[in-house]
Amino acid sequence: MNAKRTLGWTAASLAAASLLYIERDGIRSRLPAPTEPRVRTTYRYFAHVYNTVANLFLFGQERPTRRRVVALADLQPGDIVLDLACGTGRNFPYILDRIGSEGWLIGFDYTPEMLQTAQQTVDAQGWRNVTLLQGDAAQLSREQISAALPESSEGVDAVISTFAFCVIPGWEEALQRAANLLKPGARLVVGDVKLSQRPLLRPFNLLADLLGGLAAGDLGRQPWLRFGSLLGDVTFEERFFGFFYVASGRKQR
Ligand SMILES: C[S@@+](CC[C@H](N)C(=O)[O-])C[C@H]1O[C@@H](n2cnc3c(N)ncnc32)[C@H](O)[C@@H]1O
């Protein structure tokens, strides 16, 4: 009897959670949008535990997503790469592995505490071709990037960004500015978390939404829908039951 009742309650709760996320065009987060002060405060504190909890928090999808993003960026030895909202620099080893010591990596983020952890890794690894910049991705300028490079360049060979577009408050502007920095033929690749649109998995959007909210993220954003107006050769793939995605595009020549 008790088992029946538990099953009944579970089914009712899943159905109720599912109803919360039924929409015709995309799925919006049910949480208030993260404000800039909230993002800043969250990552000031997260910086101290980020490297320890990231993979767990991302259900083991952290490394596969980073690998896929870097693979799609089509990096070559000697390339200049911008890691936008780089956090503690967890993409750096994957990028440096491809661009080698003759390439250049710029890590850009606006939380000093996240960048401090990134700097510790850079120092510990002895990477000499990495510049860390602090700033707001929504105000990113070509001048800022040029000043961080050892030689003048007409742009960057790739911009990658992971687990950040759901967080960046002015993400639309950040996307536009990132695309503007690309050399002709260069790629922009974004990997991130999102709500799932698969009908059977909708109840789990509540959990995803709450976890995303803890990290000051809005999982209802759909940055890939803007890629087509900024870039060519756009690709979009869903991963892990539709809760993750990787999107890419190429600056037209
Ligand atoms: C979830 S962390 C992801 C960090 C890193 N990209 C990774 O894959 O581990 C989100 C990062 O976005 C950064 N961020 C949020 N808004 C930003 C903005 N407007 N400009 C630059 N960085 C921003 C935060 O400081 C934080 O480091």
Image (cartoon, helix red, strand yellow):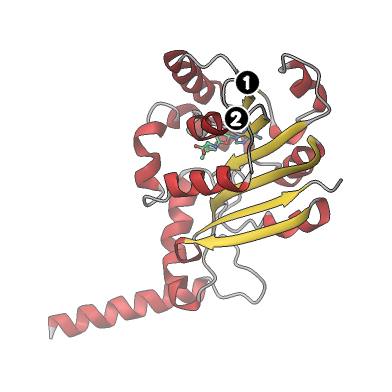
Q: Local crowd at mark 1 within 10 Å, few (<14), some, or many (≥20)?
A: few
Residue at 57% x, 49% y is 191
* 48 to 197, vertically: above or below: above
Q: In the structure shown, which secondary structural element does the residue marked by tag 2 occupy? A: helix
In the displayed structure image, the side of residue 235 where residue 101 appears, left or right: left
Residue at 41% x, 79% y is 15
In the displayed structure image, the side of residue 57 where residue 220 appears, left or right: right
The residue pinned by badge 1 equals 102
Locate residue 144, reporting x and y percent: 76, 21
Locate residue 176, reporting x and y percent: 79, 43
Query: Count of labels shown?
Result: 2
Q: Quadrant of residue 236?
A: bottom right
The residue pinned by badge 2 equals 99
The quarter in which the C terminus is drawn is top right
Q: Nearer the viewer, residue 104 or 190?
A: 104
Q: Which amino acid does label 1 sit on?
A: Glu
